[in-house]
Image (spheres, grey):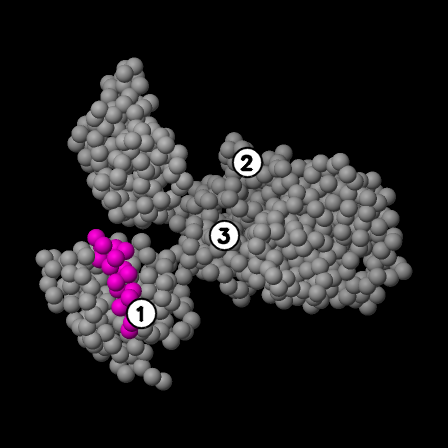
Amino acid sequence: MRLELGVIHISDVQFGPETSVKDGTLYVDQDALVAHLKENEERLVDVKVHLARPGESVRITPVKDVIEPRTKVDEGVQVFPGTVSKVLPVGSGRTNVLRGAAVVTIGKIVGFQEGIVDMCGPGADYTPFSQLNNVVLEFTLADGLTAYEKEEALRFSGLRAATFLAEPTKAMEPDEVSTFETLPLMEGAKKYPDLPRVAYLQMLQSQGLLHDTYVYGVDAKKILPTLINPTELMDGAIISGNCVSACDKNTTYHHQNNPVVEDLFAKHGTELNFVGVIITNENVFLDDKIRSSDWSAKLAQYLSLDGIIISQEGFGNPDTDLILNCKKIEALGIPTVIITDEYAGVDGASQSLADADKAADAVVTGGNANEIVILPKLDRVIGDINVVHVIAGGSDKSIREDGSLAVELQAITGATNELGFNKLSAKGY
Amino acid sequence: MSKIRVLHYINQFFGGIGGEEKADVPPSIREGKVGPGMALQGAFRDEAEIVSTIICGDSYFNENLDKAKEEILQMVREVSPDLFIAGPAFNAGRYGVACATIATAVKEELGIPAITAMYEENPGVDIFRKHLQIVPTANSAAGMRQAVADMVPLALKLARGEEILGPEEEGYFPRGVRVNFFAEDRGSARAVDMLLKKIKGEDFETEFPMPVFDRVDPAAPLKDLSSATIALVTSGGIVPKGNPDHIEASNASKYGSYSLEGFMDLTSETHETAHGGYDPVYANQDPDRVLPVDVLREMEAAGEIGKLHEMFYTTVGNGTAVASAKQFATEIGQKLLSAGVDAVILTST
């Protein structure tokens, strides 16, 4: 499967009479955008559109999801299959990407598992979304909806907005084109007989109760581990539907720009043969954990792998899935590297993970999520600053008298990402 | 720059007062360097000077913990040094615990840089490694020269307020404290590089060494409960009223063994908890909630179990070092085995 990504660089975002991209500026027709979203989602009562650019003194919270605007150039098919577009296979042909722009959805759902994005200052160093030109959608939903209904309405509306912004660039000549290709197994083996066969096992958050991920529209709780082409991820085959701790939830943006996929492709054909992606889930029942980890290991063996990278999402309970996957695949003689993050306490002195095994001898960490950071007061808040009292990583003392925040990294969207999206790490002292 | 003023802490043995028979001497302070202070002073050259030395008996310190600590802290306050050095203690257990306790107190309560050194199996290491830098030494004073050479550079850095790097760079026992930093490459790129090295069999360094959890295989099930002697052992701190052996509320240094003869039911009249890590109200109201003597007596009377073992063993699990817990368990296990106990019910909190 072969996909061309046509990258259109975005360096500014402005409101305009027509949604379009000119000279690196994304213009947003906000009336048309709002009308489009309301037309497709009757549960939306109100949508406010805000713009936030890198370096501005702006704090956005509570952030639910971040989505990169992308559109298929090919006719008849669109990104995010099975959710806001038809269930058609994606991952081949041409996709245009508005690189440097994002849709950020905000709005209260459960009230304690959404995050902060600062566009400047020390908080900006921890979230990759401070570097983007953000179209922030603040949703108000109809009364009487359950949290699950609200979450779904926001999830779909965010995806629709991202597609809406990118669609006008279908015919545009991109600034650059990158090509990604995964060969059928036998062809790949023949073409790269001397390179180690490497795959990527991506664990999808599926603990339920607003901790869900969707694959072509299917709730990941209900899947058995399966194979997927890496380019399908680039076309939005996997999307986020979860409200877990902000620091280590994978937003849809992370899925679209999965860094493990990118970095394996970067060495594909030279240092390794990137065979493909196995996806599995992180269900809460022990039988599911056992079944899924057995299945992942069987697939790893079936693919005749020489090595595999395993990424996690979330913490605590999923630590057990991570260790089960690692242990079972190592037991088959296939070397693993796992990517996780740590909850070592505010002082960094507690046990970092809820499970451990000596087989996990190669670990990459996204850092200690309990570390406290001070975020100075910023000029403008998009959303509601008072949620900082209740979101995971905040406390009733988080908003200080001078307006600055004292929060755990946990509260910052994407801060300790377990796909390895960031440079943050931790070491022992 | 003026010389760094150092205060040195040593025990009665290294202070030349005497051996075990003098271990109960209270703390005293002398001007200048004493005993191992000579070697330290040599290594300091002109950068630092030992202005005073505190000498305290190991038994005195450990048996009068709060009092001894306060007496010594008062001496430290009066000298107001730039740096506090305790030991090295090598493999002397009580000396090591004293060094680490007082160095931690000086660091945390007075804000004065403090350091100590001892052998890796000294219980002071496990109990205090999180709190301060402890430099590894040999297991006896024969390693004094090396210990001093290893301690001094780190001690001077601490005194000067310089950045302290990781345990490998600086030579101290890993404190088990995780600190965030921004790496050169993003995590996914680090993972790909690590995997390629691992596949090729090259050296690689994990970013998080897995903690070692002891996994104990469950014992084989009892064949016949009705003839079995069952013992109760707890880390929930249940002790006879008044805590006769003064088991500490936290980080216990001992366990107690007490008779259950004649007790059908534990009450607030007879027993209580010594544990300082949980709300003791409910355990004190009815100690059976932590040590279920009442239920086992009923089972004994009904013939469901052979009998309840006449002794119970107890300690406080709150903040107690794994090393201490292991030592208690080994001793208790031996006693239970020689008493012919068939099975044990372990309760925690």
Amino acid marked by disc 3:
Glu
Q: Where does the image place residue A7, in percent across and percent down from the top left?
A: 74, 61
Q: Where does the image place residue A25, in percent across and percent down from the top left?
A: 80, 65
Identify the subunit bearing mark 1: B
Q: Where does the image place residue A97, in percent across and percent down from the top left?
A: 75, 57
Residue A347 as seen in the image, left or right of residue A169:
left
Identify the subunit bearing mark 2: A
Amino acid marked by disc 1:
Arg
Q: Main secondary structure of the magenta part?
A: helix
Count of labels in the image: 3
The furthest residue to the top:
B302
Task: Give A367 or B301, whichever is nearer the viewer.
Answer: B301
Q: Where does the image place residue A370, in percent across and percent down from the top left?
A: 51, 54
Residue under the point 22% across and 62% down? B89
Residue under the point 39% across and 56% down? B176
Question: Dots 3 and 1: beta carbons under 8 Å?
Answer: no
Quadrant in which residue A405 is drawn: bottom right
Q: Which residue is mark 3?
A: A342
The span from disc 1 to disc 2 (Cα, nearest Å) is 55 Å
Q: Residues within 10 Å of mark 1 (few under 14, many from 20)?
A: few
In the structure shown, which secondary structural element does the residue marked by tag 3 occupy? Answer: strand
Residue A118 as seen in the image, left or right of residue A19:
left
Q: Which mark is residue A97?
A: none
Q: Which residue is mark 1?
A: B77
Q: Closer to the N terminus: mark 2 or mark 3?
A: 2
Residue under the point 43% across and 45% down? A356
The span from disc 2 to disc 3 (Cα, nearest Å) is 20 Å
Residue A355 visible, this orientation: yes
The verdict on a common chain for dots 3 and 1 is: no
Q: Which mark is residue A284?
A: 2
